[in-house]
Amino acid sequence: MPHPDLPILPSESSHLTQKFGRETANYFSGSPLNRLSFLRSDTAFLRLAYAHPRARFLLLNNLHPLVQGSDSSRLAFATHADVAPLAGADPFAKSEEEMVEGFDSREEQVVVVFLGVDEKGEVEVEQRGEGEGEFEYKGFRGPPYFAVDVTPRGKGTAAAEGLIEAVKGRGYAFHDHSPRHMGLHAGQAAMYGQARALVDWNARTPFCAQCGQPTLSVHAGTKRVCPPADKAPGVERRPCATRGTVANHSFPRTDPTVIMAIVSADGSKVLLGRNRRFPKDWYSTLAGFQEPGESIEEAVRREVWEESGVRVGRVILHSSQPWPFPASLMIGAIGQAQPDGEEIYLGHDAELEDAKWFPLDEVREALAKGVSSLGDPAPTSHVEGALRLPPPTAIANRLITAVVDGWWVSSRM
Amino acid sequence: MPHPDLPILPSESSHLTQKFGRETANYFSGSPLNRLSFLRSDTAFLRLAYAHPRARFLLLNNLHPLVQGSDSSRLAFATHADVAPLAGADPFAKSEEEMVEGFDSREEQVVVVFLGVDEKGEVEVEQRGEGEGEFEYKGFRGPPYFAVDVTPRGKGTAAAEGLIEAVKGRGYAFHDHSPRHMGLHAGQAAMYGQARALVDWNARTPFCAQCGQPTLSVHAGTKRVCPPADKAPGVERRPCATRGTVANHSFPRTDPTVIMAIVSADGSKVLLGRNRRFPKDWYSTLAGFQEPGESIEEAVRREVWEESGVRVGRVILHSSQPWPFPASLMIGAIGQAQPDGEEIYLGHDAELEDAKWFPLDEVREALAKGVSSLGDPAPTSHVEGALRLPPPTAIANRLITAVVDGWWVSSRM
């Protein structure tokens, strides 16, 4: 049974389910927004969307999102009038060319990210105001959503603090929705994930990695360019290779991460591990960063061997989960140990405190009785000393569930 | 039948094949090396490995690898004596702490990347010299492999040019193994992919994206740190947030990219597209960069809709392919169009010149008769005007093949 906090796919019950079977949608996916990425350089669109009465602004303060104070599982939003004193009444007035041409390193940019348009009106059904005409542009209809970084800093400190006080005055709050507390409703978690990843990337990456000079946020928060000149007096910009070519570090970084449930060669056990930060009896799937020049399947085999000594044969890909802490993409896989490769050895890499093979029955029991978020206490059904596992909002749980449900056996490749 | 240039998995014919079915291994995967990533900070290991007579050095000149002059499908390697004048006789003498402590921005680093150890002796079977004892460290045995950036630049220009002349004198050559000419043998392509990605990342990223100051390559070419001080006279280093925390841009960047074969709702057709750079009649699968805060499955649906107007329902992950141009990871998927979403519209994004639904029979015919590398002429079996497709070394070909073979129907999720 799907967890209530997991995204529901649009085609959940269509005939596609019969053709393809279920697609696993993980927490932080399932955004209700159409990103309309091809309109990010269309300043006419951005200006109309930003100033529209239906526009909604997701505020991030130190990366914590604004939520309904009475219900931290629901995002709260600001309006154009709220954000204008900090981000400007018309921040998209200039084209990318004009912004680059007018670059002045003395100016401090408040990053505004265009998230997308809510074509189906799913985000804010109840709060829709009276007398607000629908936003429409070139056939795309629905409230436009933006994210604004309201962390007080630099010259914008007073405006940011004023905005923060104003929204708090409405009963809203900034809530820590870190991995230890994944409590946002599904579609809203996905919107927050997108906003967090892009706001954080802009904040972490103010300089060009190629030449070391300050960069400028363009494309509605999704690109940073290295301008050739600076209006600040006495500042001579050095040449930069990114100006003549498409450079990948002009674009947001997404770090692919492998996460995998490993079954024993005979299919009777699952390999799980724990690190020192986990609560007592808590285990999860192994995981690690993808390295340059290896396939996902190879990364799974490498990480499992490095962390646990277990040698893995075939690997099949299961599903994926955006993980905006700060910029990961979790790629879930199921692998099968080689018959002579099941011995556990923790000495290669000192990452895990323990790794163990768990019989499927014990894992099934734990999925039923011992599941909770990392930051929460064990559920009352949990028996002291029994295995504890991550919640359904974690892809680790989905992978472990796929193994005990026999998904990996029925998936032929 | 597997293509001769595709990697053979170690467990190809074991009982794992029966349990799991085949795992698709794509070109640029299948490295014979064990990366031993946990030894990259072990200077004792690196020093012994680097100086060992069995050590082999893959040279990259402007990112082109050194190959056997008579056979450009096989890499050629240099020895310690060859690289010492450029990269130093003992470049791993200092620990990371000592390197950071002694950082002097006036010094130019020649990047040396530790690739791994060839435990099974697969890389250089024929060229093994007499009288060279096997390399062994803490139980890991086999020739160690490194990559060295020999592109002539700065103070190292003369040494680099000398090294290049020396290896050319042995009949070796630097060969363009770009995507238009994927002609390396499978395992060697994977080694080259790893080397290229890391050498290129070090060259593209000499500055800290957080603070704009020069960084230092450590961990045998797989990490860059932002030192707190500089021995160069008069250079005052500013504070940097990366020094107190683990920052993702200290590590190589890998850009996840989705690439997908889309089948029609009834399974009878495949959606393929072409851009202006493709030769006449040449089509391939659609593809695009993963964005922050979306799952792979969502990225597939977004990119297909943006580029072709087609709306996709379920998406299943197929396999992956490292793509070191400069740092992509291709994630292959198969998706099924929604029954009312098959209409093609190219107006959202101007990326494609054309997109079309091709009946499976036509695609099967093209796989048999019209397959070639992008840079090569059509095969003689190709009939003028018929569909042309990418070669088996491209994941696009593997995905299209999976569709016509019915893989997507038999994969239940």
Image (cartoon, coloured by chain):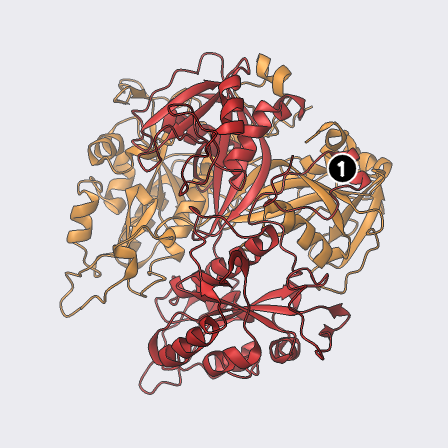
Chain colours: A orange, B red
- Depicted A3 relative to depicted B14: above or below: above
Q: Is residue B306 visible?
A: no
Q: Is residue B91 above or below residue B128?
A: below
Q: Quadrant of the N terminus of chain A?
A: top right
- Given residues A175 and A25, the one toward you in this image is A25
A168 up-or-down from B261: above or below: below
Question: What is the chain identity of the residue bearing mark 1?
Answer: B
Question: Which of these two is toward me, A239 or B188?
Answer: B188
Q: Residue at x 16, y 47 (%)?
A: A98
> In the figure, is residue A59 to the left or right of A103?
right
Q: Which percent across, then down, holds residue B125?
A: 68, 63
Residue that label 1 marks: B17
Picture coordinates of residue B289, whole percent (x, y): 43, 41
**Which element is circle 1 on?**
helix
Q: Residue at x 54, y 13 (%)?
A: B266
Numbered marks: total: 1
At x 72%, y 80%, the residue is B131
What amino acid is at disc 1? Thr
Label 1 environment density (alpha carbons within 10 Å; few <14, some 14–19, many ≥20)? some
Occupied quadrant, residue A167: top left
* Residue B90 lies in quadrant: bottom right
